[in-house]
Image (cartoon, rainbow, N blue to C red):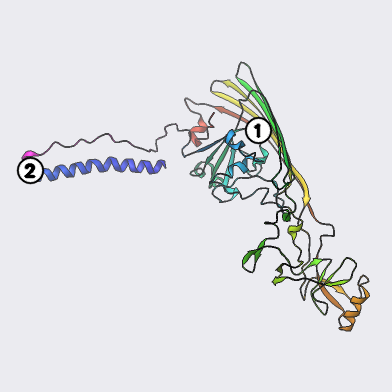
Amino acid sequence: MTRFGSVIGACAAIFVPAVAWAQTATSEQAAPAEAPPADEGGEIIVTGSRIDRNFDTPTPTLTVTAEDLSVGARPNVAAALNDLPQFRATTSAQTTGTNTGAGNAPVDLRGLGINRTLVLVDGRRIVSDNDLNTIPNVMIRSAQVVTGGASAAWGSGAVAGVVNIGIDEKFSGLQLGAEAGVSTYGDAAAHRFEGKAGFGFAEGRGHFVIGGEYFNSDGIVPKTARKDIGRWASFAGAMTPDVGFSTSAYGGLITSGVLKGKAFNPDGSLRDFDYGRVAGGYMTGGEGPSNDDLSPLMTPQRRYSALGRLTYDITPSIKVTAELRHSRMYNNYIWFGDHVQGTATSGILIQSSNAFLPAAVRTALANAGQTSFYMGRFNSDLSYPTIDFERKVTQGTLALDGNIGSRSALERLLQPWRVSE
């Protein structure tokens, strides 16, 4: 924007006198004796310039206050920012229910990917892959968002933009909070406890603040708990409800030979498998099983985080900052099962000599001259896999901020963020 304004201002400065000269020359040719005085022109205002005027930010900045972030009792700052049109909810508890990224809360500006959005804490880079769950919500004073021009100062990691989190480092006193809630469907129960405390010392030259939070959410398990979401999938070119596998069944589905289309009951006997409407390896209706019957719609998560910061003004122009931040995300919940899909030539190969086959099944195979068959199986009754994950982040920061003349040396180089009070 600054460069565009500079070009417009320069063009205006050149173009206006040229027009005035052309008009004067034409008048002199028509009536030399009565030529009007040359128009000296009015004041020209340059709306943009490359000259550094000590701006706090070189690009438009959106500031979101702590009060704005608290609206709606969001589980984290990322969820609150995702309400803004600049962000896309790429990774959340709703989108990471079945992978090891469960519980992350990064931000994604412009939908370009979380690795192209840079997160800073008071202008400093943080570890934890852009995860805002590592910062206690109660310690956040504001969030500033820039979606353009940031990569010039911060590199390719800021192509989409920068989110700068401001910490309430001047808080004094004690603040405690608690909240709990449940969805209108009676699920997704969650509760949070948070608090912070701060005090000044050395006649106001130093300040210490510390805060933390604990959050626990039951999530929504399984996906079929919401009838309009679970078992919906793209089927035969359209989004269709009640979609399941057509190549496996609870207990096992025979997919080859004379017994093809028979499924095993818990006692080992056979039944006719209800296929419903089949398209490829899936079907709608019938008794086809689905991972949605077991896997989570919204990830259960537990986490705690804490942050302590000490600031001290050595001189009016030099400040030292020491900070320690720690967080832990952990949980254990059901995951996708390790199922086997059967076809006429693949799956679980069962020999007719298998000791667990009922006599009626062995007889049917012998009568057909077959010695084996393939089977697909939905293994929900076996040792079903779970995600038992833990993610810890600990970061220590020691910073020295100083001024050279009227401006800091770092500001001269990078024009860093200044978080509004």
Residue occupying the point 81% across, 60% down: 380
* Residue type highlighted by circle 2: Ala
Q: Dot 2: what SS?
A: loop
On screen, residue 392 above or below 258:
above
How many badges with numbers are in the image? Answer: 2
Residue occupying the point 75% across, 71% down: 275
- Observer-side mark, 2 or 1, equals 1
The foreground one among 49 and 31 is 31
Q: Is residue 263 visible?
A: yes
Instruction: Give percent across and percent down for residue 213.
Output: 71, 34
* Residue type highlighted by circle 1: Val
- The mark nearer the N terminus, 2 or 1, is 2
Numbered mark located on residue 31 in the image = 2
Residue occupying the point 68% across, 51% down: 96
Residue on which the image places disc 1: 138
Instruction: Give percent across and percent down for residue 43.
Output: 27, 34
- Marks 2 and 1 in Cβ contact (< 8 Å): no
Instruction: Give percent across and percent down for residue 113.
Output: 58, 50
- Neighbour class for label 2 at 10 Å: few (<14), some, many (≥20)? few
The foreground one among 7 and 239 is 239
Q: Is residue 328 visible?
A: no
Q: Is residue 264 left or right of residue 99?
A: right
Residue occupying the point 77% across, 56% down: 294
On screen, residue 117 above or below 167:
below
Instruction: Give percent across and percent down for residue 305.
Output: 71, 36
- Magenta span: predominant SS is loop
Q: Dot 1: what SS?
A: helix
